[in-house]
Amino acid sequence: MVKFPYQRLAQAFAALQAEALPQEELARRLAVSTRTVRNDIDALNAILAEHGARFVLKRGEGYRLQADDPERFQRVRPQAGSDRAIPRQAGERVHYLLAQFLGSAYALKLQDLADAWCVSRATLQTDMAEARERLAAYGLSIEAKPHYGMKLLGAESSIRVCLSDLLAQLAAERPDHPLLSADLVLADALATVRAGLPGCLSRAGVRLSDDGAQFLTFYCAVAAKRIVDGFPLQDFCGEETLPAVDQAATHIVGLLRRMSGVEIAAAERAFLCVNIAARSLTGMLPSAINADDADALVCYILDYINRHYRYDLRADRQLREDLITHVKTMITRVRYQINLPNPVLADIKQHYALAYDFTLAAVSSWAKHSPYRISENEIGYLVLHIGVGLERHYQIGYLRRPQALLVCDGGNATLRTLEAVLRRRFPQLEVCASLSCQEYEALEHVSADFVVSTVRLEDKRKPVALLSPFPSDYQLEQLARLVAVDRTRPYMLERYFSAKHFWVAEAGLSQQALFERVCGQLREEGYVDADFLPSVREREDILSTMLGDGIALPHSLGLLARKTTVCTIIAPHGVAWGEGSVARVIFLLAISKTEYEEAMAIYELFVSFMRQRAGVRLVESRSFEEFLRNALLCLPES
């Protein structure tokens, strides 16, 4: 059997068995650097050497599993992924604890579970904290009584939804997970539902997303299991639904009746209708959802973005229709506390960082006047619509066009010929000035990114591309390399970062003290007004601005600064940043309404730091000059 000394090696081994992956993608999945990936591959190869296999790096594909002795490797390969009845890792134990409490009709004793899983009671008590937090999200709690044990308390509907979400998550991560087959009644019900549910939906004309169909499959199996165990759903009153949803529920109720052998109560059918409608692409009747609520929320979000961030999307009819369609079913999920997982939430935060901040601020403001609490997962889906709308109407990803100084020793005709060639071959290139050789020699310095010249020039610390009046392909290729360099992010560093807004924090500094010190300095210098600090605090209270990798990005709600700047705080000892996170590199962002469109590219700069895992390098900076050098080294070359 292949044994791995730590869990990450097992994860890498499982991922690379399924497909070839490049270093960067494997690093992203494992949340480590590419250097750590290379070390892990070396460790894996050392382990696999005695089993006749190794991972090889193929150009253009990535790491691929290669069995040098297939027969010897095949003998251990099935065992490497064999089921384990005993959870070994903390994450696994949390899943098993949830399954135990959600499926048990009796009180459980932690010591009995600890003995069965060969761990200490103290270890399980630590795992119970996360299990309680997961259950609390569904309105469930655990009551503990001395000499009696611990028992789950909460509504039957919440128990079913929580268990269905857990099983769907486990199936997505590992289809052969032991918890999916441990209960024979549940396993049989799951097989029956998988065979019969598609027909029930298709006959009714109901369309579900893949995630929605996956959840409904597990919910129906869990419902059948709970009914058989004597836990029917009672006292649930639904609301009017579309005829298609109602018809689908009728078909599924028949399926549940055949599996359980008992008559299905009206409450079961009503809750089934809600779960179908909440995940249906057709939704519920406008009268049932109250379309005014959906339309009001969409209008509020778009108005808020226009008023506070100066991006006007109110006239985008496609965006409005897409948002209203999504919000109608979202309100149903929020009303009945139906959780919709968002597996791409982390990617949404990175790729749509600007849209995420817009949407979060707008929804949080709207929530103050609404009884609904919209989860981060739901906000992520709204962000996708907003992000697409921004891309449709604005150049959100500001790009600084490369600037060139043209030096020509020929006449006016030669100069115009070269300008025409440059415009035709490099439309993104901006020729900021055209000078003669004498005028160039008189310059003290060159502000352009590089120089395009027809003659050799003295060095003024900027690259020079030599071209003939009718440039060759080779000369144009050399120039193309200069034009292709992305100068936007270095330009952002030069323009919005400064030595006066850089400092190294002392040990023991709190988040609030940091906010007061930085915002106080900005106010004294005239960058912000008195309302900036309360807004920064409010934004942090809504949701942590921790990006990950030790990098935090605090900022205000809306564009409240008079002038745009970024304050950089290096905290070698760390600053507690809520929910157990520690920030070591803090960028406090202040953006003004007059510079918002260009300054928004700063978000892309921070996303680059995240993707390059720059936190470790940046935290070593002890001066502004050292920070700039480290930051430039952390930016991608292209």
Image (cartoon, rainbow, N blue to C red):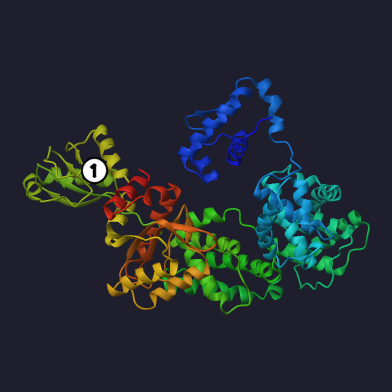
Q: Residue at x 50, y 62 (%)?
A: 356
Q: Is residue 185 left or right of residue 412?
A: right
> From this viewpoint, is residue 228 visible?
yes
- Residue ID for mark 1: 421
Residue 217: give x, y in percent of width and height. 77, 53
- Please state the horizontal and vertical placement of residue 2, each as a whole percent of the image: 66, 30
Q: How many marks?
A: 1
Q: Is residue 457 left or right of residue 223?
A: left
Mark 1 surroundings: few (<14), some (14-19) or many (≥20) residues within 10 A: some
**Residue type indicated by callout 1:** Val
Residue occupying the point 50% across, 59% down: 388
Given residues 120 and 510, the one toward you in this image is 120
In this view, 569 is above or below 452? below
Q: Position of residue 37 (x, y in %)?
A: 50, 37
In the image, taking residue 155 as reference, residue 291 lies left or right, namely left
The answer to whether residue 280 shows anywhere in this view is no
304 or 479: nearer the viewer: 304
Of the pair 315 and 252, the residue shown nearer to us: 252
Which of 8 and 444 lies nearest the eye of the viewer? 8
User: Which part of the image, by quadrant, shows the C terminus?
Assistant: top left
